[in-house]
Amino acid sequence: QKEVEQNSGPLSVPEGAIASLNCTYSDRVSQSFFWYRQYSGKSPELIMSIYSNGDKEDGRFTAQLNKASQYVSLLIRDSQPSDSATYLCAVRGPGSNYKLTFGKGTLLTVNP
Amino acid sequence: EPEVTQTPSHQVTQMGQEVILRCVPISNHLYFYWYRQILGQKVEFLVSFYNNEISEKSEIFDDQFSVERPDGSNFTLKIRSTKLEDSAMYFCASGDSNTEAFFGQGTRLTVV
C-alpha cells in the first residue's frame, strides 16, 4: 500500500514568516512529486511540481526533494493570509498511469 | 487558459438513484481521472482512463461505478445505485505523460 504522510496541523504562522510543510512517502520508486493547495470546499490547485533531488523555486514557493530520505517539503516565504489553506502533497509513480496518491494535507493558517 | 470543467457543481439525489457526473477535460490531454474526497478526508483515486478504456481502478471503484467517454470531449462517471456513503466531492482531472494533472472545480454529491 503506497502511503503519503503529512502532519495534519494546523500549522499557524504570522504574516510575513516562512511556513514549512513536510511530506514523506513510502514507495521508493515514486518519480514525481506535487504540492497542491486546496481552499475549503474547492478543488486542488497545483502550485509546485518537482522531479529531481534538490530545490526548486517559484516565486515565494520552494519545493525540496530528497529521494534517499523519501521526503518532500514546501517552503512558503513571506506568508500571506491568502495562503491560508490545506496543502496537499501528491506522489506519482512510474507505470501507474500517472495517477496521484495524496496525503491528507496540512492546514496552514497565516495570521495577520 | 484551458481548464477542466465539471457539471453539475452540486447534485442532490435519493439513495438508490443513478447519477451521472460530467466532465470536459483539457482538449489535448490523453489521460483522464476521477477522484473523490469525502468531507474531512483525503483525495482518493477512483479510476484512470486512457485510449478509450479504463487503465487502472481502485478498490473503491466497484460494479456500481462506470466511466465513459461518449464523444470526443465529455468524460462521465456514473454511479448506478447511490448509497449514503457515496456523498463526497468528486473531482475530474486530466493530464498526459508530460504534464501535471489539472483538476476541475468538482461536483458535490449529496445522497439523502
Image (cartoon, rainbow, N blue to C red):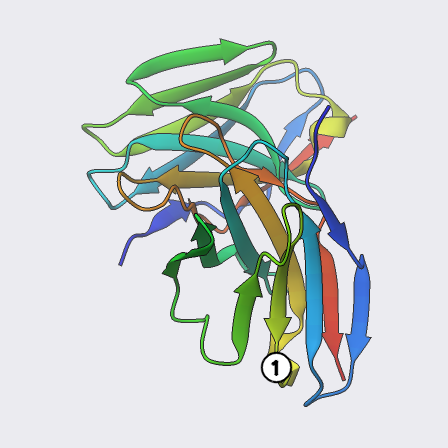
Residue B92, position as x, y percentages in the image: 61, 51
- A74 or A20, which lies in front? A74
User: Which quadrant is home to the C terminus of chain B?
Assistant: bottom right
Relative height, residue B5 to residue A49 (above, below): below
User: Which residue is found at the position 57% from the left and 18% from the top?
Assistant: A18
Q: Chain of mark 1?
A: B
Residue A11, position as x, y percentages in the image: 58, 38
Are there few (<14), some (14-19), or many (20+) residues within 10 Å of tag 1?
some
- B10 or A97, which lies in front? A97
User: Which residue is found at the position 75% from the left and 73% from the top?
Assistant: B110
Quadrant housing residue A86: top right
- Determine which residue is flagged by label 1: B80
Regarding mark 1 in the picture, which secondary structure is present there? loop
| Horizontal side of residue A59 vs B63, given as left or right | right
User: Which quadrant is home to the N terminus of chain B?
Assistant: top right
| Horizontal side of residue A46 vs A65, given as left or right | right
The residue lying furthest to the front in this view is: B71
- B101 or A23, which lies in front? B101
Which residue type does callout 1 highlight? Answer: Arg
